[in-house]
Image (cartoon, rainbow, N blue to C red):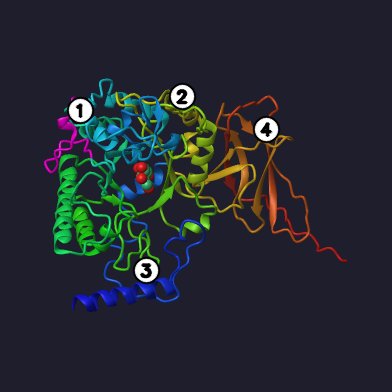
């Protein structure tokens, strides 16, 4: 029976590979649906594009904050003056430092770092206030990263915050402070645990391995239920570390667990990283259906084209240093994103119906990196003027503009100008068949009205027509700026030209 099941699974996965090569391709092009549908027991649990309040809120967020905090913040990607792994990023992975530059007994040093986790400057209210000022509408907070250290007083592991000098429940402080500021909270949870002896990377095979891994699964379930019991205000769970063969083989368990979590917590939002189907297909099942409430694979990457998303909800999580999530003491020698970069990436996301989630990695005392403080302030200043082009907006079907990004809310169209034309004419391209065209415009910065002129340049065979919005020369901005454009019925004069006779 066991052998028969294995053979059936191999056959199914071969079928899957031959009918759908899209498992890894979904982030780099339009979604390819498999030619044939296979029968599946472990496909999606929730419908796509849920319409409940939590998902509607998710669609309106525009900007979020990610915080990676844990004991890895103490070394900050270096130890005794030596850069971890040659200064490579992903400082939260510092426990995996090996080779000649790694301090002697590094793993042991790391596993004892929690004894130094004093978090003496940590003030959740201050973080929440900064996030609010920056304009973030949701927070994703690391309750536990791959090292397994829990920032809440979990009953199910001793490797948790109560054993540190700080002692208090950090998750509670964060959830309460952000909720009080009106910022929704999602809990990041890494399934993978480096220092848990029951965790396995490969699929469990022997009785002993099965016993171990079943213990681990039970522990994971307990922790997740505990998080939902302790922090009932949270809106979603943000899973990570779910790529190993062991977890993938537990598809029946993860399917039942997802149901249980959703039953326990009304309208809980879970992205596409939590589980896979019985063929090992992650994010999208073997038939190409989204496994979760939104696409959760846009990590430091973007769809090139709106069509790639196939109408799915999504967010993009983004670091300031390249791939640096946890605290990195030393930003020198690295390109760290500027506020202009972040505005560009945020507008790129919202113009395609996604949210941008900007990552912060506080230090071991609980202070944000000074570079993060600057970006939070500058972004907040920009959002105070231009936020209406970010929140509650949707993708516009107008042809993509070389000047920047469109977003739309009802009859209001927003153009975030990234590339200002040298002649100060902001040209909006509108299909000739459009029933709504620009009729009035104003700059969100200063609320100055701008002239709008139909500029029919009369190109033969052109499917589009053009509207020019004139920017005053006196208006100067050293950042992207937003033009709010009222859309209305076109002037009745016909655009129809005689075709050229050649
Ligand atoms: O390995 C992690 C990484 O440390 C970080 O937490 C990011 C955030 O999206 N997720 C991982 C890999 O996808």
- Tell me the residue that label 3 is attached to: 286
First in sequence: mark 1 or mark 3? 1
Q: Residues at badges 1 and 4 in contact (C-beta under 8 Å)? A: no
366, 14: nearer the viewer: 14
Disc 3 packing (10 Å; few <14; some 14–19; many ≥20): many
Q: CA distance from mark 3 to mark 4?
A: 51 Å
Left or right of residue 448: residue 247 = left
For residue 265: magenta? Answer: no
| x and y, in percent, of residue 447 in the image | 56, 29
Badge 2 element: helix
Q: Residues at badges 2 and 3 in contact (C-beta under 8 Å)? A: no
Mark nearest the camera among 4 and 2 is 2
First in sequence: mark 1 or mark 4? 1
First in sequence: mark 2 or mark 3? 3
The mark found on residue 374 in the picture is: 2
In the picture, residue 77 is in which quadrant?
top left
- Tell me the residue that label 4 is attached to: 471
Tally the numbered discs. Answer: 4
Q: Main secondary structure of the magenta part?
A: loop
Q: Which residues are magenta?
A: 149-166
Q: Residues at badges 4 and 2 in contact (C-beta under 8 Å)? A: no
In the picture, residue 278 is in which quadrant?
bottom left
Could you tell me which residue is drawn at 24 percent across and 27 percent down? 117
| x and y, in percent, of residue 322 in the image | 47, 38
Q: CA distance from mark 2 to mark 3?
A: 44 Å
First in sequence: mark 4 or mark 2? 2
Could you tell me which residue is drawn at 18 percent across and 29 percent down? 164
- Tell me the residue that label 1 is attached to: 115
């Amino acid at each position: 029976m066991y052998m028969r099941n294995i053979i059936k699974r191999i056959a199914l996965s071969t079928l899957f590979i031959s009918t759908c090569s899209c498992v890894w391709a979904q982030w780099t092009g339009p979604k390819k649906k498999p030619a044939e549908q296979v029968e599946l027991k472990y496909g999606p649990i929730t419908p796509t594009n849920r319409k409940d309040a939590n998902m509607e809120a998710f669609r309106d967020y525009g900007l979020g904050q990610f915080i990676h905090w844990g004991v890895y913040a103490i070394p900050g990607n270096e130890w005794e003056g030596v850069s971890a792994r040659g200064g490579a990023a992903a400082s939260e992975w510092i426990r995996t430092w090996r080779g000649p530059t790694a301090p002697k007994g590094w793993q042991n040093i790391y596993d004892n770092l929690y004894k130094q986790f004093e978090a003496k400057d940590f003030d959740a209210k201050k973080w929440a206030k900064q996030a609010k000022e920056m304009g973030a509408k949701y927070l994703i907070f690391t309750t536990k990263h791959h090292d397994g250290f829990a920032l809440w007083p979990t009953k199910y592991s001793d490797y948790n915050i109560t054993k540190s000098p700080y002692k208090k429940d950090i998750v509670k402080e964060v959830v309460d402070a952000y909720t009080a500021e009106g910022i929704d909270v999602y809990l990041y949870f890494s399934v993978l645990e480096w220092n848990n002896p029951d965790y396995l990377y490969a699929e469990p095979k022997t009785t002993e391995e099965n016993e171990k891994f079943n213990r681990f699964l039970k522990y994971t379930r307990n922790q997740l239920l505990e998080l939902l019991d302790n922090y009932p205000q949270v809106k979603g769970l943000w899973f990570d570390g779910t790529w190993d063969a062991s977890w993938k083989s537990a598809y029946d368990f993860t399917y039942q667990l997802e149901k249980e979590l959703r039953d326990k917590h009304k309208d809980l939002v879970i992205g596409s990283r939590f589980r896979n189907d019985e063929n090992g297909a992650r994010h999208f099942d073997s038939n190409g259906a989204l496994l979760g409430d939104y696409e959760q694979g846009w990590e430091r990457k973007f769809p090139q084209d709106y069509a790639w998303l196939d109408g799915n909800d999504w967010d993009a999580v983004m670091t300031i240093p390249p791939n640096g999530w946890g605290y990195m003491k030393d930003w020198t020698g690295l390109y760290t994103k500027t506020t202009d970069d972040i505005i560009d990436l945020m507008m790129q996301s919202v113009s395609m119906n996604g949210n941008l989630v900007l990552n912060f990695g506080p230090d071991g005392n609980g202070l944000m990196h000074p570079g993060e403080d600057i970006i939070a302030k500058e972004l907040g200043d920009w959002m105070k003027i231009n936020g209406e082009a970010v929140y509650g907006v949707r993708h516009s079907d107008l042809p993509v503009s070389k000047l920047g990004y469109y977003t739309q809310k009802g009859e209001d169209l927003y153009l975030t100008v990234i590339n200002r034309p040298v002649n100060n004419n902001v040209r909006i391209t509108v299909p000739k068949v459009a029933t709504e065209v620009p009729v009035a415009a104003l700059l969100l910065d200063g609320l100055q009205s701008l002239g709008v002129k139909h500029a029919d340049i009369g190109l033969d065979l052109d499917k589009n027509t053009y509207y020019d919005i004139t920017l005053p020369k006196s208006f100067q901005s050293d950042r992207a700026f937003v033009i709010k454009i009222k859309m209305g019925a076109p002037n009745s004069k016909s655009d129809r030209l005689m075709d050229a006779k050649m």
